[in-house]
Image (tube, grey):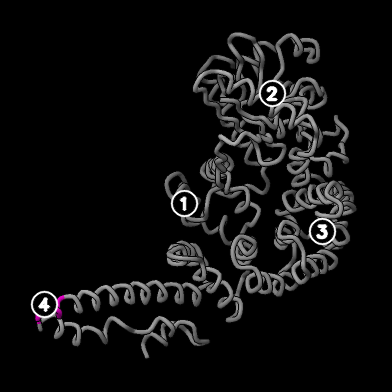
């Protein structure tokens, strides 16, 4: 098993079009398939993933948590699951987005359990996690002589060294660390971090790495916030190792600094209105990286992008009404959540009506955070749920009903989805029953026929009643 292909030092600072990615991919395939009946698993993030051309392969995508899986995890681990689920799924779209990652959702739940409130930004939940683990490790493993400030300072220096040395990647040898981090207690801190589950030390080589890539980024953000490191603005559009760290930084940076970061990113993202994936692939990828930065870094305070809202709305509207590539449309649709209600409402409605399926997912998710919806939007979301092929519509209706029920704003929609499921089950049962009756009548049994005549009116209330403009409950009663 080869994990973290995208974190190979020679790959980490380049985009997915870099020539070395294909070369390394071919070298790995040649190596791992060299033995008789050999097998291999190569794991990677979506961007900078390996390019494996071998036909004898299977590609598996680790899907993010769905809404119902998030609720299930919250119900298991949170102290007040109903309230936390309401915050994540109806009030805080930034937490709803990062909560699809099981690791980050666990940090949100841990922060909520310890502080009785949701984190204002990702950095806050990381700090809560580290403080808790540091206290536990100091009391359990006898490191009481190390104070928290010393530990944080050395962690920041380690993260800075890793990010600024291109040939190091996300792990570093103890020899390299001793050269770069001048501290008499470095060895003690490294052992402490391993005991606290913040870092790990390889037994054979002695190399150190943080337990999760996000930990590197958090300590780097602390260093950026203190002003001890310069902000690499060009990492925003280049998707280098700094980009995800800058997303965390944008969430907590001062207003002036955050607006400066946003202006830099928008200078590239705005080009999506004039370029296409087919005509200028490299420019499109650069602009997409910049837009992704804005989406991920400003979900918790979209008001800082106020000067771009009108232009962004026009850009999205132009993309969804023109004959554009689906990837281009999906790219800009993800930015709907950055717009205020008065600008996003019409876009959400148009996307739900015009793009059924995977493109509409972002619009449906954005609609969930609206404080209220009218009949038009409720109908659009309803059709999005039930128009899935096969029995997926029934499954989608069940999942969405439980999620939308969290907010009172969706009471009408929840009622429609409920009666849609009831009527569909009745119709299925009625069809099975009538077929059974027909079979038994052929055997000259009059009892099934009598039962069919008696029960049919109660089982065949038409499903089409739900598709009128009135409320489903009233139609059902009539």
Which callout, 4 or 1, points at the residue further toward the start of the chain? 1
Q: Residues within 10 Å of mark 4 (few under 14, many from 20)?
A: few
SS assignment at label 2: helix
Q: Which residue: 53% across, 72% down?
A: 410
Distance (Cα) linking label 1 and label 3? 33 Å
Dot 3 and dot 4 residues touching (CB under 8 Å): no
SS assignment at label 4: loop
Q: Quadrant of the C terminus?
A: bottom left
Residue mark closest to the camera, 3 vs 4: 4
Which residue is disc 4 drawn over?
A: 443
Which residue is disc 2 drawn over?
A: 27
Point out residue 421 in the picture as x, y percentages from the top left corner. Answer: 39, 71
SS assignment at label 3: helix
Q: Residues within 10 Å of mark 2 (few under 14, many from 20)?
A: few
- Is 63 included in the stretch rendered in magenta? no
Dot 2 and dot 3 residues touching (CB under 8 Å): no
Which callout, 1 or 2, points at the residue further toward the start of the chain? 2
Distance (Cα) linking label 2 and label 3? 44 Å
Which span is picked out in magenta? 440-445
Q: Is residue 65 above or below residue 243?
A: below
Which residue is disc 1 drawn over?
A: 80
Point out residue 305 in the picture as x, y percentages from the top left corner. Answer: 82, 58
Which residue is disc 3 drawn over?
A: 305
Q: Is residue 112 above or below residue 448?
A: above
Which callout, 4 or 2, points at the residue further toward the start of the chain? 2
Q: Quadrant of residue 178?
A: top right
Distance (Cα) linking label 4 and label 2? 70 Å
Q: Which residue: 74% across, 55% down?
A: 301
Q: Nearer the viewer, residue 358 or 432?
A: 432
Distance (Cα) linking label 4 and label 1? 59 Å
């Amino acid at each position: 098993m080869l994990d973290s292909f995208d974190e190979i030092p020679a790959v980490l600072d380049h985009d997915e079009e870099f020539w070395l990615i294909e070369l390394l991919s071919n070298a790995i395939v040649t190596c791992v398939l060299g033995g008789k009946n050999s097998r291999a698993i190569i794991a990677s993030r979506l961007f900078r993933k390996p390019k494996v051309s071998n036909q004898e392969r299977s590609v598996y995508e680790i899907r993010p948590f769905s809404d119902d899986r998030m609720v299930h995890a919250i119900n298991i681990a949170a102290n007040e699951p109903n309230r936390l689920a309401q915050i994540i799924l109806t009030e805080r779209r930034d937490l709803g987005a990062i909560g699809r990652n099981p690791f980050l959702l666990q940090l949100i739940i841990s922060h909520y359990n310890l502080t009785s409130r949701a984190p204002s930004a990702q950095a806050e939940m990381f700090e809560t996690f580290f403080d808790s683990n540091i206290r536990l490790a100091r009391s359990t493993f006898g490191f009481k002589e190390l104070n928290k400030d010393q530990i944080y300072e050395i962690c920041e220096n380690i993260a800075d060294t890793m990010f600024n040395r291109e040939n190091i990647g996300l792990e570093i040898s103890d020899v390299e660390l001793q050269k770069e981090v001048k501290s008499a207690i470095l060895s003690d801190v490294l052992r402490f971090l391993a005991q606290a589950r913040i870092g790990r030390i390889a037994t054979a080589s002695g190399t150190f790495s943080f337990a999760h890539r996000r930990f590197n980024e958090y300590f780097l953000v602390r260093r950026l916030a203190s002003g001890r490191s310069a902000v690499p603005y060009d990492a925003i559009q280049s998707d280098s190792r700094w980009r995800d760290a800058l997303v965390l930084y944008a969430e907590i940076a001062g207003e002036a600094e955050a607006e400066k970061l946003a202006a830099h990113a928008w200078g590239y993202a705005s080009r999506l209105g004039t370029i296409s994936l087919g005509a200028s692939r490299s420019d499109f990828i650069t602009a997409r990286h910049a837009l992704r930065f804005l989406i991920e870094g400003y979900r918790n305070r979209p008001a800082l992008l106020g000067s771009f809202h009108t232009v962004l709305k026009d850009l999205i509207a132009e993309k969804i009404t023109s004959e554009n590539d689906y990837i281009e449309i999906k790219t800009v649709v993800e930015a709907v959540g950055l717009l205020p209600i008065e600008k996003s409402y019409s876009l959400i409605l148009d996307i739900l009506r015009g793009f059924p399926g995977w493109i509409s997912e972002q619009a449906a998710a954005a609609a969930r955070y609206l404080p209220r919806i009218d009949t038009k939007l409720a109908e659009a979301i309803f059709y999005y749920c039930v128009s899935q092929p096969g029995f997926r519509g029934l499954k989608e209706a069940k999942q969405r009903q439980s999620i939308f029920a969290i907010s009172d704003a969706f009471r009408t929609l929840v009622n429609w989805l409920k009666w849609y499921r009831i009527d569909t089950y009745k119709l299925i049962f009625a069809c099975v029953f009538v077929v059974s009756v027909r079979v038994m009548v052929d055997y000259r049994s009059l009892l099934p026929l009598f039962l069919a005549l008696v029960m049919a009116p109660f089982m065949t209330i038409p499903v089409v009643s739900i598709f009128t403009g009135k409320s489903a409950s009233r139609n059902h009663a009539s």
